[in-house]
Amino acid sequence: MSRELILAGFIMCVGLCIAGAGTHLYQMIARQQAMLRYDGKTIWHGLGNLVMSFFCGPYIMLQMGWRQQGETMSISMGLVAAFVAFGWSFITGLMIVGTYVSFL
């Protein structure tokens, strides 16, 4: 039972690391803030934004949950954002680890 829990935690960590690195890389290359979006000037820009939003989404969701509203931070918004982000990072990490293992 503990092996499965550790494996799930590892997969989530991989997904969150990929999301964080991808977000900062996107912001460095595109010179604009990474946001969850699917619009673009052309259909290719739109598809690029959609792929970026999928892989970088967990990190962006965590940043959205940590934003302050006025002078205080909402605990409920932080918990919901963390729940969604860690679930999303599990899916992203599962894709990355699965691809790595299949080509190993």
Image (cartoon, rainbow, N blue to C red):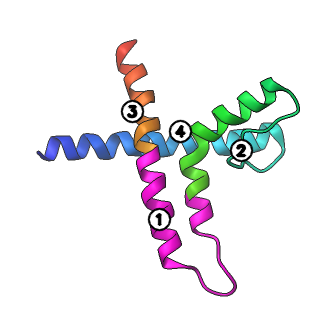
Residue at x-position 40% and y-position 12%: 103
Q: Assign a secondary structure to mark 1.
A: helix
**Which secondary structure is most common in the magenta stretch?**
helix
Callout 2: few (<14), some (14-19), or many (20+) C-alpha neighbours within 10 Å?
A: some
Residue 85 drawn above or below residue 38: below
Mark 3 vs mark 4, foreground winner is: 3
Whether tag 2 and tag 4 are in contact, CB under 8 A, the answer is no
Q: How many marks?
A: 4
Residue 34 is a magenta residue:
no
Q: Assign a secondary structure to mark 2.
A: loop
Residue 101 drawn above or below residue 79: above
Amino acid marked by disc 1? Val
Q: Quadrant of residue 43?
A: top right
Give the labeled residue for mark 2: 37
Residue at x-position 62% and y-position 62%: 64
How far across and down, in percent of the image, does residue 25 sit? 69, 39
Whether tag 1 and tag 2 are in contact, CB under 8 A, the answer is no
Q: Assign a secondary structure to mark 3.
A: helix
Q: Which residues are magenta?
A: 62-88
Amino acid marked by disc 2? Arg
Give the labeled residue for mark 3: 94
Whether tag 1 and tag 3 are in contact, CB under 8 A, the answer is no
Instruction: Answer with mark 3 or mark 4, whichever residue precedes in sequence.
Output: 4
Q: Nearer the viewer, residue 52 or 38?
A: 38
Q: CA distance from mark 2 to mark 4?
A: 18 Å
Instruction: Answer with mark 1 or mark 4, whichever residue precedes in sequence.
Output: 4
Q: Quadrant of residue 97?
A: top left
Residue positioned most to the right: 41
